[in-house]
Amino acid sequence: MFAALAGAYLIFALLLLVIILVASWKIFIKAERPGWALLIPFYNIYVFTQILCRPKWWVVLYFFGIVPFAGSFAVLFVSVVDSIRLAKLFGKTPAFGVGLILLPFIFYLILAFGNATYCEHNVVEGELI
């Protein structure tokens, strides 16, 4: 019984992973970045920070998760701020950015396959969000 539940959970988790990967690939392409960059560890974070119009040192913030407890909150903060910024770059509201955090498998698909277009001019250089 437990094995069947574990197998079903694994299949469901893999399905969500594939959905996120396909949507993220499409978002990279909409932002005029190569989709294959998503598949390369560490480089994908660098390209993502470029999409967000962040300085190069911003990549380091994603690795604070290694630090127990405090690092988890730091990564959570950066993820929320960057999701809201990603939404703004595609002409969406900050509420949509919160949706990217809470229900990524739905909101990333909307961002990827909807009519949203990437525009670097939607954010001001130097502002946090």
Image (tube, rainbow, N blue to C red):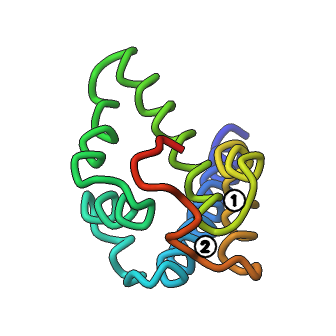
Q: Position of residue 2 (x, y in %)?
A: 68, 37
Give me the disc on residue 105.
1
Q: Position of residue 57 (x, y in %)?
A: 22, 47
Total label count?
2
Do tag 1 and tag 2 residues touch (Cβ < 8 Å)?
yes
Which amino acid lies under the numbered mark 1 shown in the image of this protein? Phe
Dot 2 lies on which element?
Answer: helix
Q: Nearer the viewer, residue 68 or 55?
A: 55
Label 1 crowding class (10 Å Cα cut-off): few <14, some 14-19, many 20+? many
Q: Is residue 34 above or below residue 101?
A: below
Q: Position of residue 36 (x, y in %)?
A: 36, 81
Tell me what residue is drawn at x 27 percent, y 61 percent: 41
Dot 1 lies on which element?
Answer: helix
Is tag 1's residue or tag 2's residue first in the polypeptide sequence? 2
Q: Quadrant of the C terminus?
A: top right
Which amino acid lies under the numbered mark 2 shown in the image of this protein? Ala
Q: Is residue 109 above or below residue 55?
A: below
Tell me what residue is drawn at x 69 percent, y 70 percent: 111
Q: Position of residue 91 (x, y in %)?
A: 69, 67
Q: Quadrant of residue 5?
A: top right
Label 2 crowding class (10 Å Cα cut-off): few <14, some 14-19, many 20+? many
The alpha-carbon separation of the residues under discs 1 and 2 comes to 8 Å
Give me the disc on residue 47.
none
Residue assigned mark 2: 23
Q: Quadrant of the N terminus?
A: top right
Tell me what residue is drawn at x 49 percent, y 55 percent: 124
Tell me what residue is drawn at x 39 percent, y 71 percent: 38
Q: Is residue 2 above or below residue 36?
A: above
